[in-house]
Image (spheres, helix red, strand yellow):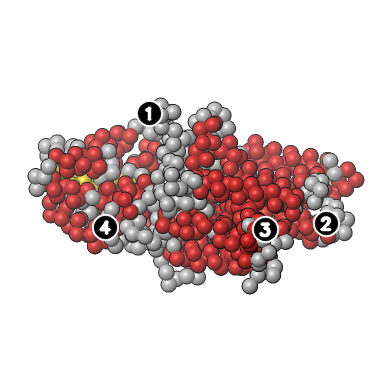
Amino acid sequence: MTPATPRHAALVTGTTLLLVYLATLAPGITLWDAGEFASAVESLGIPHPPGTPLYILVARAWRSVLPFVSTAVATNLLAALCTAASAGVASGLVARWTRDPIAGIASGLAFGVMSTVWFNATETEVYSASLSLSMLMIWVGDEAGRRRRRDAGLGSLGDPGSSVRHLRLLAFLFAIAPPLHLSALVAAPGAILLATVDADLRTDGRWATLLIGAAALATGVGTGSYAIALGGAGVLVVGVLAAGSVRSQAAREALALAALVAVASTVFLFLVIRSRFDPAINQGNPATVSAALDVIARRQYDVPGLWPRRAPFWLQIGNLVQYVDWQFALGLDRVVGASPLRTPFTPMFLVLAVMGSSVHRVRDRRSWAAMLVLVTAATFGVVVYLNLRAGPSYGYGILPPDADREARERDYFFALGFAALAMWIGQGAVRAARSVRAWRHSRRAGWAGVAIAGLPLVLNWTAVDRRREPGASLPNAFALATLESAPPNAVLFVAGDNDTYPLWYAQVAGGVRTDVTIVTVPLLGASWYRTELARRSGLYDSTHASAWRGASAELADIAARAGRAGRPVLAAVALEPSTRESLGAAWSMRGLAYVRETAGSPSSTAIDVPAVDSAIARIDALLAGPADQSLVGEPAARYLIGLLACPALAKQAAMGSGGDTTRLLDSRCNFR
């Protein structure tokens, strides 16, 4: 049965993809930021800068209506719903633009099964919500443009009709993007074009100027940039001055848009208000306006400008091409480089995208131009703006061996670009199927195009299915096994995000071993974190928090304070030996952590065999399958599986096994 309207196409696509996402949904937390976000939702807290307050508030409200599941499952479901809805909107838009609901379904399906989009749809991350806001901007922009042509006066600034209400709504969506996640604003140029350009590509310059000013003002406020905010305000003024005979109406609209930005920005007050209650997750502790601005502007990080480039520009583009190659058939081969099994599908789908773009241009030049702007902004524009370092798997043999690289693959920054490109792929697939001579006059030709566009559903499944073991239970197993390796009231030093966030979630959402204080070594460079250690656990002198004395001195001081309080000092197995030396000289391995021996013990690393045996049994019980690195595709997951093997390696070494075991223990588990 052929869907009759764009609304039917959206419903078919959204429902289908929601079922797909539910079938591949992570059963708990995943690696990287998911554990932190889920912990922040559970505690109504503040995750890492920029704090994403709107996302936390929405996710917390969503979680409150699902009390029968864990926080992680609830927020995973929110991601699935957001992404399915986004694909549904994409489907409805293409069906409207092309007057072809089948092409709409093909486009929406392709949109939702790009590997990066699919990954984001099945875990607790802000990018699924950001994608839904981006697509909402595109839909509202399209509605505003359509209504402008219908309303009396063709969209004059004094028109009280529905087009003006939609234009104001679009500005409000721009304004709520920074409190959710700034990445949603990548859709703003395409949305503005849809709202202000007619079928002959003539632009309503006054409204375009006002919307550009509103978007810039929202960006400035949402990034803590006075220069961008003033620039946005200046563009609004230009829009008023250029309005000529309707200058007074233009002034009222400019003030209305500025007021909408101001109202939306009040969401950031959540950071100041909530941090004063010191929730379990309180990154940046933005309890003052100044501290909140630091969080919003991400001053904790090394935020790059547009120049100098942190990697050669052509290499940054090459990194994007690498990520494009992962989108269509990742289940055939998960290697990071080109693959003879996977890569041939990439040019095939890109050809379909070119065909779809050609079809779209003939059917509706206005929306085609907007899509061209959207795809460009969400791919090459993101490359220019983010100025990323080379990815961890790219540029070898070109860059120096010690070149600074991103901590993880950043393909998720380009999810909107991949999804938008897929909207053309769907149209191209339907056109290609209808061009086949044997199918030309068959109603089934369109559905054959849907099948072609949906091929990544099959080709990506095994790579993106988050229910597959051992990956599905790995973060939870690692967290529980690590925490249970600790003696009572211990102070546990860990090495980074994947050492930290699963443990936070186990403590905050599960109440597991809350007696253990986790000290994340990379965060010690932030004064707010040192103050937090002083405030919560007495492990730091708050009067010294503003002065950084170097990693070794800070670690030694914290460990000494823990010792004076009679608290055991532990170092996670991932912690480098040189870092562990700052905490103490003599250590005993007892599973997934080393316990500092009492003062006066000889400098050495021993193996606590009974504790290691207990850790091995615990890990075997927690994992739902074999801890086989070949069964997971993500490098971080393979690394954690390697860490989970540390107790077994230690047991073999204690029993006098061969040199290979000792070498693995030294290199993988930092036994030295």
Q: Residues within 10 Å of mark 2 (few under 14, many from 20)?
A: some
At label 2, the amino acid type is Arg
Number of marks in picture: 4
Disc on the earlier residue, 1 or 2: 2
Comparing 402 with 236, the one in front is 402
At label 1, the amino acid type is Pro
- Mark 2, residue position: 149
Nearest to viewer (mark 4 / mark 2): 4
Tell me: 32 left or right of 353: left
Disc on the earlier residue, 3 or 4: 3
User: At x 41% / y 57%, what residue is drawn?
Assistant: 462
Disc on the earlier residue, 4 or 2: 2
User: At x 19% / y 59%, what residue is drawn?
Assistant: 617
Comparing 346 with 440, the one in front is 440
Residue 218: image location, x then y, percent: 65, 46
Per the image, label 2 sits on a secondary structure element best described as: helix
Q: Quadrant of residue 546?
A: top left
Nearest to viewer (mark 2 / mark 3): 3
Disc on the earlier residue, 1 or 4: 1
At label 3, the amino acid type is Val
Tell me: 41 left or right of 469: right
- Mark 4, residue position: 626
In the picture, the disc for residue 94 is 3
Q: Pointers 1 and 2 in contact (CB under 8 A)?
A: no
- Mark 1, residue position: 401
Measured in 3D between alpha carbons, the distance from the residue under mark 1 to the one under mark 2, in whole angstroms, is 58 Å
Measured in 3D between alpha carbons, the distance from the residue under mark 2 to the one under mark 3, in whole angstroms, is 19 Å
